[in-house]
Structure formats: structure tokens, C-alpha cells
Image (cartoon, helix red, strand yellow):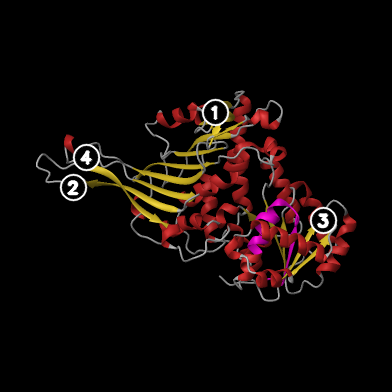
Amino acid sequence: MPRDPVAKLLLFGATGDLAQRMLLPSLYGLHADNLLPTELKIFGAARHDHDDEGYRAFARKALDQFLPEDRKDEGAIASFLERVFYQPTDLSDPASFAPLAEKVGDIAGGLAIYLSTAPSLFESAISGLQSVGLAGTTVRVGLEKPLGYDLGSSREINDAVAKAFPEERTYRIDHYLGKETVQNILALRFGNSFFEPVWNAQGIDNVQITIAETVGLEERAGYYETAGALRDMVQNHILQLLALVAMEPPAHFDGTDVRDEKSKVFRSLRIMKPEEVPQMTVTGQYGEGAVKGQFVKSYAEELGQPSNTETFVAIKAHIDNWRWQGVPFYLRTGKRMATRRSEIAIQFKAVPHSMFGARGGLLQPNMLIIRLQPEEYIQLLVMAKEPGLDRNGVRLREVPLNLSLDAEFAGSRRRIAYERLLLDLIEGDQTLFVRRDEVEAQWRFIDAIREGWDANNVKPRSYPSGSWGPSAAIALTERDGVTWQDD
């Protein structure tokens, strides 16, 4: 699609953790590879009282800490920092915006704004930007999650943003969509012909999506206690992965067609009735245990008080459309799990009849595993003949066909997801960003689950740190004759 690069980038929250760990290293990586527009200037804005040189020293320290050693180039770092400027800004103070506008200067060449701030500040930020002419037709805005805590609050945020930025200039960020392996789902499905005939209810028995973390609260106690696993992970990352697996083929790889098809999936997600929620979901909270051989405290101990916030959730979801009718989608995420893993497991239906008899062994249904992290690979489990003369019959065994993306593309640098997303924001490509109708459909699904938990007084079940969650999560799949893919 045509690119429309801007001449200036404005980062709010420029001294925050995300800026240090991801945004500044990503922008440096794009600069070092000559991918940024030659004249692009980067303006940081936050409450800290830096001048240009003070912020450049701050940015250099972040790059020293978070860049891989093989990416550190003193000349590239120095030339990158020449692009960087800073203006102290308090988003809650209307008087802060006039000095900011003066610092940014002329925006006729286009301005991209990245709001890496608390959503409670979005409305005052938008109002302030409007008041000083930084929200005109040459300006686009990127919004970092979370965008609300339910459908109502999400609409309030989106309405506030829409006062200044129409949908075609609004870029809602889900960093999972910037991951190479996530984009490879589209390449696997729509760049190859052999899966499409069986990529439906006739060929697929079930789909499992897992995002498991070994970490606990870390530094996010304040946010996590109000969010929980359902809002923090399912509402955005997991449902976006579900949409990429389930969507119909778009006509083109662009921001309209791809997001149209994802939106259709979200509108087809079956909304649970309150009485169905206890049977279709499992919620848990980690207790004490051992992770990687180290003793760890329970969630309540880390938090310092009792809590009913869930750190684990498993869901049996359905998509009510022609392609997926009757196929369960098992969704699972949790903290303090046995291993760190993000993957999609697609189990195909078993062959209707085995011609190999009892000696052939139990035929296992084929399974396609797409591992997103920490390794990146695609694995297809197939039945193969064991070597031998077969005088008493053929014996079969399940074997993996592996495509390691890490190995296959070892000569290509694996980019941070934010590199792709920041470059797309700068150049004006919305394909990997989330549209408002997607967000609101996702919230309808999530809100129904929370309402069901409340109506049935569902509380999180305790599970040991270092496990795969509450035992009830096993029962969620096994009563359908399905086992979680935990190998």
C-alpha cells in the first residue's frame, strides 16, 4: 500500500519503562538500518524536567542497558541521538501544551503521536493537543493499551480520541501483531494451498491458544490488581490470535481488508450467558511454589493483601459461523506457570478408519503447532511408518515435521515487534493495528464472562506456582476428550 511518512514523531511517556525497554531501542534499530525517513525528528514528552541534552543522556543510558551488544554502534547511536529532542509536559495541565507545540514547530510535513500513558490522561491529552493545533489533518495518533477496563470505559476513551482523530488517523497498538511469528500465521494460511481445504469444521477438531508466563507481579501490581488475566491478556492478545486463525481470506493484505475479516470473527464469537460461564471458564490465582527451581511467593503475598484478582484463566469459546460451527477454541493464559510459552495448537480430525489393524497402533490425529515464543517454529505432527520388514504388519509412530524460523532465517535479524509497529505508524500503514469495532466486539465477549463470574460468585481457584494452573482447567478440555498441548 502507498506509504505516507511523517516528518516528526512525538512520544508521550518518553521516560517510562516501555520507552526505555522497547520504544527507544526500536527507533534506534530502524535508524541504524536506514529505515526511518531521513529528516524525521523525534520529540520526547513527559513530566520529568529534562532539556534536549539531558534527555539524550537518558536515552543513551536506556540504549546501553537494553540494546543487544551486537547492535551497539557508537556512530549510529550518536547520529540517532541527533534526531532526539525533549519538552517537559504535564498532560493534566493545559498550560503545558503551548511550549510543546512551540518545540515541535511546523507539522505541515506530518506528525505521528504515540500515547504511551495512562488511558485516564487520553482525554486531557487530546484536548490539549487540539488547543495548540497538534491534532490536524496531518497528524495521526498511536494508542498504547489498556484501552479501558470494559465496553463502557473503552467507548469513552474512543469517543474522546475520535473528537480529534477519525478512525483513519487512529492506530491502536497490540504489540503481539508486530511479532514475526504472528504475521507468519497469515503467511502459513494464505500463502500455501494445502491447509485451506481442511481449515474448517470438517477438518479441524479443536484449536488451543496458550500464553503462559513464569513471572509474577513484577512492577505491575497497581495495574494488574485492577485488570487481571482476562482483561490483561485475553481481551487483546489471545483474541487477536484467535481472529488470525479463524478469519476468512482477505482480498488484500491491507488495513481495510484484514481488519474487516478479523471484525467478522469477533462478531461471530458466541457471547456466554451468565449460567454458562462457570462451565465454560476456569479462573485461578497462583499460590506459592517453585519456578525454575526457585521458591516464589503467592500472588496475595506479593500484593501484600488478600485478593480475588485472577492470574489464570481458561476459556472454551465458540465461533458461530459456517467455517467454525462446532469447533471449540480453548484459550488459556496465566502467570507463574510451568514454562514461558506462547503457542497455537491446531488439532485436526482423526482419519475415519485405520487400515493398519491392531499392530499399526493407535493413530494420533495430526496437529499443527505454531510456537510464538520463546522459540519460533512451526511443527506438524504426522503418522509415519517405523522402519522394518513389516512381516507381521505395519507399525506407525507419530513424528514431527519441523520448520524452525530461528534456524531457517538465522541470517536475518529478528526485530522487536515495536520496530514494525513504530515504522508502520510513521509511514501510515494500519494493517497491524486494531480498529474500534474490533475492540468493542472483544469487550462484549469479555464483559459477558465477568458478568457471569459475578452472577455466580465465581472466585479464583488456587494453583501452585510452577504448574499449569488449576486442575479444573484440565477438566475443561478432558470432558470433551481433549488434552492441553503441554509438551
Would residue 175 be seen by someone viewing this image from the given angle? yes
Residue 10 among those drawn in magenta: yes
Magenta region: 6-27
Residue placed at 77% from the left, 71% from the top? 107
On residue 145, the disc is none
Q: Is residue 221 above or below residue 123?
A: above
Label 4: which residue?
Answer: 353
How many neighbours does mark 4 have within 10 angstroms: few (below 14), some (14-19), or many (20 or more)?
few
Q: Given the image, on which type of amino acid does mark 2 rest?
A: Pro
Q: Is residue 145 above or below residue 164?
A: above
On residue 387, the disc is 2
- Work out how far the residue at label 2 is from the one at label 3, CA to CA, in angstroms: 72 Å
Label 1: which residue?
Answer: 464
How many neighbours does mark 2 have within 10 angstroms: few (below 14), some (14-19), or many (20 or more)?
few
Would residue 133 be seen by someone viewing this image from the given angle? no
Dot placed on the residue nearer the N-terminal end, 2 or 4: 4
Residue 346 among those drawn in magenta: no
Dot placed on the residue nearer the N-terminal end, 2 or 3: 3
Is disc 4 in contact with disc 3, using a CB cutoff of under 8 Å?
no
Dot placed on the residue nearer the N-terminal end, 1 or 2: 2
Q: Given the image, on which type of amino acid does mark 1 rest?
A: Pro
Element under disc 3: helix
Q: Is residue 478 above or below residue 220?
A: above
- Work out how far the residue at label 2 is from the one at label 4, CA to CA, in angstroms: 22 Å
Element under disc 4: loop
